[in-house]
Structures are given as structure tokens and as C-alpha cells.
């Protein structure tokens, strides 16, 4: 479980990852060295907020140059693959079922819904620079703000 004190900050090195994508292939953060990377964590594929967020990012992909978009959730690759195909997302969706990477990014924590507390992904996004350092950190970002904040950050 994460708390405010364990949150990542701008300028720190982004935690590495090596996870399976929606096709079952391993994807590492280091695969994208030399490019900016937006890593966004979402709670569950094919749900309203997550679909809004992912489709918003898909819709700005032609405006972000060579910046790479990567989504990470606890969903299994087959579920992410079906979601990718349904909405033509076109970027890697990585499976983190044991939330080890979510823990490294301090996005696995307690959530509340209808008064019930449970553990899950706290929707967040991280813009990583070409050298692997955190350029922007957005905890508890809204689905609609994710593409807007990415575009604003890239415009400087």
C-alpha cells in the first residue's frame, strides 16, 4: 500500500519495468531509451473512465511526436488485447497482475466506492524524459485531464 510520502517526484529516475503487453510480449521501459514516454496507470480495462482516458490518449497520439504511450493495469493480456481491438488504441497495454510495478510507482492504494474500502490502482500518469527521469508526475489524474496535461507538458 502506498502513502503520500512514498510518491515519486519530478527529477527522480523512473522505476524500471518488464511486463507482458496485450500480445504476451515482454516490454521494458529501457526499450524506449532516447524517447519520451507517458506511462499511465488505470484501474480496469474496458470500463468507462479507463476507456475515456485511453481513447483520449489515442486521439492525441498524432500530436505528440515520437512520445511513446504505455498503459499499465492489473488486467491480464487477453483482456487488454480485446479492449485494444475494440477501441483501436494502438499502444502497449501492460499487465501488472501482482501490482509490483504499481507499488514501485506508488499508485497501488486504498480506494473507496459507496463507502466500501478496497485496494486498487490510483489513476496516475508519469511523463518520463529521454534519459529515464520523471519530467511530470500526475497522481489522481482524471481520465479527461490525462491527454490535456500530456499535450501541455510537451508544449512546454
Image (tube, rainbow, N blue to C red):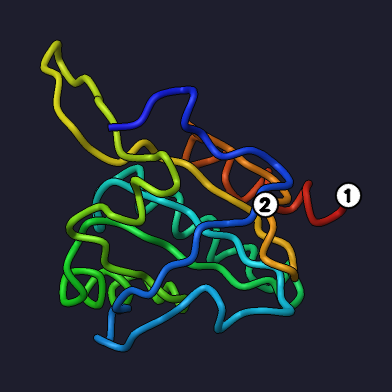
Q: Are marks 2 and 1 in contact (CB under 8 Å)?
A: no
Tell me the element at label 2. strand
Q: Residue furthest top?
A: 115
Give the residue drawn at x 63%, y 55%: 13
Label 2: how many residues lie within 10 Å, few (<14), some (14-19) or many (20+)? many
The residue carrying mark 2 is 134
Give the residue drawn at x 58%, y 50%: 126
Give the residue drawn at x 18%, y 33%: 119
From the viewer's perspective, is residue 1 above or below residue 59?
above
Give the residue drawn at x 80%, y 56%: 154
Q: Is residue 143 left or right of residue 118?
A: right
Figure quadrant of the N terminus: top left
From the viewer's perspective, is residue 5 above or below residue 8?
above
- Residue 150 at what x, y percent from top left? 68, 51
Q: Nearer the viewer, residue 90 or 70?
A: 70
Q: Is residue 65 left or right of residue 105?
A: right
Label 1: how many residues lie within 10 Å, few (<14), some (14-19) or many (20+)? few
Among the two numbered marks 2 and 1 on one chain, the one whose residue lies closer to the N terminus? 2
Which mark is drawn over residue 156?
1
- Residue 39 at what x, y percent from top left? 52, 59
Real-space Cα separation, disc 2 to disc 1, in angstroms? 15 Å
When asked about the image quadrant of residue 32, the answer is bottom right
Amino acid at each position: 500500500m502506498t502513502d503520500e510520502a512514498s510518491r515519486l517526484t519530478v527529477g527522480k529516475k523512473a522505476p524500471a519495468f518488464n511486463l507482458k503487453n496485450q500480445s504476451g510480449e515482454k516490454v521494458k521501459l529501457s526499450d524506449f531509451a532516447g524517447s519520451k514516454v507517458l506511462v499511465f496507470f488505470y484501474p480496469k480495462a474496458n470500463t468507462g473512465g479507463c476507456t475515456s482516458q485511453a481513447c483520449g490518449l489515442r486521439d492525441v497520439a498524432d500530436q505528440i511526436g515520437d512520445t511513446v504511450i504505455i498503459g499499465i493495469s492489473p488486467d491480464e493480456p487477453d483482456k487488454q488485447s480485446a479492449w485494444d481491438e475494440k477501441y483501436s488504441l494502438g499502444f502497449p497495454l501492460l499487465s501488472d497482475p501482482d501490482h509490483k510495478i504499481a507499488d514501485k510507482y506508488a499508485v497501488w492504494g486504498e480506494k473507496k466506492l459507496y463507502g466500501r474500502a478496497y485496494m486498487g490502482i490510483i489513476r496516475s500518469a508519469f511523463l518520463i524524459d529521454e534519459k529515464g527521469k520523471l519530467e511530470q508526475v500526475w497522481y489522481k489524474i482524471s481520465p479527461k485531464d490525462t491527454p490535456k496535461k500530456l499535450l501541455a507538458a510537451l508544449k512546454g
